[in-house]
Image (cartoon, rainbow, N blue to C red):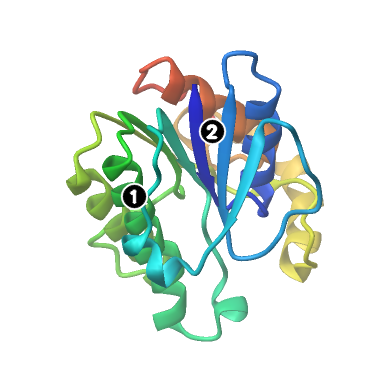
Amino acid sequence: MTICISGASGLVGNELLIQLLNKPEVEKILVLSRSALAFNHPKMQVALIAFEELDQIEVAEKIDAGFCALGTTLKKAGSKERQQQIDRDFVVAFAAFCKRSGAEKIGIVSSIGADALSSNFYLRTKGEMEKGVSAIGIPHTVFIHPSLLVGQRKEFRLSEKIITPLSFIINPFLFGKARKYRSIRASVVAQKLIDATLTNSSEVGQL
């Protein structure tokens, strides 16, 4: 099985990459990235690309499944327009690339509350991304909607350093319909998305 990943340098993306590299049925992973990764692996091939040009890229071999964990913050992006480009447009372009390359399965990291009609900019952007990806028409398309992600990021985020310890205190009080707002480890998100995507399930389980 040949897998393609974008966003592999991020928190969930790195977990996706590591877990997929450890799966015996995965023979090759093509990583689309704007910069080099910190490690190499016999199964892994890194293609350094500008995502603005993704619609011009073709691969000779068939891709069986794609995984995308692209995303940024408004602070890091510098503008709402740039954040929309990364969180929405680049993800849709990646899905189109996977479809052109023969993929019949794709798993996308979205966000809890994603809604194309939301008045919240971030949630609206994620919702528009989901609509765009769905319109590509990959037969098995999975979106996972995590709440606060827990894990070791490469970059420092003050808000997460403050909120994460509090989330472990609050989590036990969130149950029933509120359970989905619990913080969750990036490794768990990756595992659930992989399972739902590769097993052709539309159910990612209780996050």
Q: Nearer the viewer, residue 126 or 64?
A: 64
Across and down, in percent, residue 180 comes to 51, 36
Q: Amino acid at mark 1?
A: Phe
Q: Nearer the viewer, residue 120 or 153?
A: 153
Residue under the point 66% across and 38% down: 44
Q: Nearer the viewer, residue 117 or 100?
A: 100
Q: Amino acid at mark 2?
A: Arg
Residue under the point 54% across and 42% down: 181
Across and down, in percent, residue 174 comes to 59, 35
Residue under the point 61% across and 80% down: 75
Residue under the point 33% across and 33% down: 103
Label 1 Cα crowd, 10 Å radius (few <14 / some 14-19 / many 20+): many
Across and down, in percent, residue 93 comes to 33, 58
Residue 91 vertical placement versus 193 (above, below): below
Relative to 142, 135 lies left or right: left
Q: Nearer the viewer, residue 20 or 88?
A: 20
Across and down, in percent, residue 153 comes to 77, 55
As measured in the structure, the alpha-carbon distance from the residue carrying label 2 to the one carrying label 1 is 35 Å
Q: Quadrant of the C terminus?
A: top right
Disc 1 element:
helix
Residue 178 tag number: none
Q: Which residue is mark 2?
A: 179
Mark whose residue sits in front, 2 or 1: 1
Q: Which residue is mark 1?
A: 97
